[in-house]
């Protein structure tokens, strides 16, 4: 008889959970269609955050209905009721944490508030929300929080010693974000030679995308101790200088005029080249092997623009010097050989 009395509530719980899951699937299809035509992204964030937790809600409601129909002893009913409460509280905490993280990311990217959009910021927010959910679960279980905090305080020193590397990376990441010495999107060059764009700064490490489209992962503590050249500070604009050899027989004033003309014409035609400050030409103090050396300095809008600007400027200047008869030919040397006495 006991088996039969448990079979019916279990079947009801399973059927209820399955029916709710089907309704959930249909509801999400309708909500996704509504989110596509919505003008705000908040609908997408909420729907995406509720996708996984809603499954637990279907299970929790099914268990609750099945438990209300059973004749289990009060002791077991209490345990199952607390398990249902834990499932609901944990799933709500996860849903709120995911939705808050996505909305914070969208708000940071669409506003001008001085908060860098990094994984450390999202992780901190989600961690706080999940910690609150954990404290609520402990309260539901009847566990007093004050003795737990006291215990953690006593064992805090041992935990800090065991997690000193992790804590060093965490606080180094917070320090870099607060002083804004390294930001997401900056182009940096490390003292060991690695260079690339900062893709993210998490609680443990920074991810740097290098030229071959690979990612270099550097612990935050090591990055904070390293000598880092940030090519995006204080401004993304930077100066680019090209060394241009000109025929030794050329008139320096004429060569300077030609180089300035070509650099000026490139403004507005070469992507990434800026008009202000205007390009300048300087006669280098040294002489090369049978050539006059000039330097052309111009401004580009970012580090990534320098290669294409240098490439296009060199082509334009070479063609112009060739037309003007000032292009440099291959250097030649004359060797005189003397026969030694036998």
Image: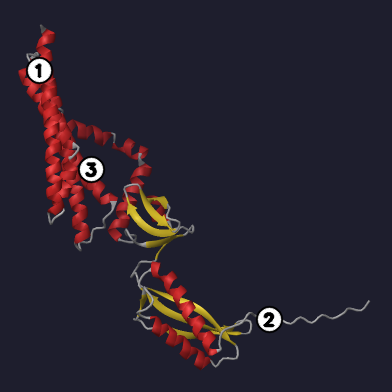
Location of the N terminus (image quadrant): top left
Name the residue at 21% across, 47% down.
125
**Figure quadrant of the C terminus:** bottom right
Up-down relation of residue 31 to residue 291 (above or below) = above
Q: How far apart are the alpha carbons under marks 3 and 2?
A: 70 Å
Residue located at (20% from left, 49% from top): 102
Q: Which mark sits nearer the N-terminus, 3 or 2?
A: 3
Task: Name the foreground residue: 182 vs 163.
Answer: 182
The residue positioned farthest toward the right in the image shown: 342
Horizontal arrangement in the rendering, residue 242 relative to residue 135 (left or right): right
Q: Is residue 112 above or below residue 13?
A: below
Q: Is residue 283 visible?
A: no
In the rendered image, is residue 230 in sight? yes
For label 1, count other residues whose C-alpha is less than 10 Å away and answer few (under 14), some (14-19) or many (20+).
Answer: many
Is 199 situated left or right of 100 in this image? right
Helix, strand or loop at label 3? It is: helix
Residue for point 34% across, 52% down: 172
Q: Tell me which colouring the rendered structure shows.
A: secondary structure
Q: CA distance from mark 1 to mark 3?
A: 37 Å
In this rendering, which labeled residue sits more in front, label 3 or label 2? 2
Mark sitting earlier along the chain (1/3): 1
Residue 332 circle label: 2
Picture coordinates of residue 300, whole percent (x, y): 38, 74
Q: Which residue is mark 1?
A: 9
Residue at the far top in the pictured view:
1
Name the front one of labels 1 and 3. 1
Mark closer to the chain start, 1 or 2: 1
Q: Name the residue rendered at 28%, 50% in the picture.
A: 120
Q: Which mark is residue 127?
A: 3
In this rendered view, identify the residue nearer to me: 338 or 201.
Answer: 338
């Amino acid at each position: 008889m006991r088996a039969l009395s448990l079979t019916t509530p279990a079947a009801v719980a399973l059927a209820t959970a399955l029916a709710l899951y089907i309704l959930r699937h249909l509801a999400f299809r309708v909500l996704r269609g509504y989110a596509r035509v919505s003008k705000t992204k908040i609908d997408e964030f909420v729907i995406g955050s509720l996708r996984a937790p809603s499954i637990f809600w279907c299970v929790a409601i099914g268990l609750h209905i099945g438990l209300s129909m059973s004749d289990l002893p009060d002791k077991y009913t209490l345990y199952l009721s607390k398990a249902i409460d834990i499932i609901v509280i944990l799933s709500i905490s996860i849903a709120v944490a995911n939705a808050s993280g996505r909305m914070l990311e969208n708000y940071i990217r669409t506003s001008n508030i001085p908060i860098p959009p990094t994984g450390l910021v999202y992780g901190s927010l989600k961690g706080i929300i999940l910690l609150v959910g954990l404290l609520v679960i402990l309260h539901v279980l009847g566990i007093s929080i004050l003795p737990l905090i006291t215990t953690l305080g006593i064992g805090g020193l041992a935990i800090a010693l065991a997690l000193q590397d992790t804590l060093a990376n965490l606080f180094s990441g917070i320090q870099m974000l607060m002083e804004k010495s390294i930001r997401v999107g900056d182009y940096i060059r490390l003292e060991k030679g690695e260079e690339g764009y900062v893709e993210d700064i998490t609680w443990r490490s920074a991810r740097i995308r290098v030229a071959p489209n690979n990612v270099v992962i550097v612990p935050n503590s090591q990055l904070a101790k390293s000598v880092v050249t940030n090519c995006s500070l204080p401004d993304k604009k930077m100066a680019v200088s090209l060394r241009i050899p000109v025929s030794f027989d050329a008139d320096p004033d004429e060569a300077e005029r030609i180089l300035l003309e070509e650099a000026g014409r490139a403004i507005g035609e070469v992507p990434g080249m800026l008009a202000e400050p205007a390009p300048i030409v300087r006669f280098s103090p040294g002489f090369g092997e049978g050539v006059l050396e000039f330097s052309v300095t111009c401004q580009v809008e970012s580090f990534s623009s320098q290669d294409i600007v240098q490439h296009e400027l060199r082509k334009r200047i070479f063609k112009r010097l060739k037309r003007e008869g000032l292009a440099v030919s291959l250097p030649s040397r004359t060797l005189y050989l003397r026969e030694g006495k036998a």
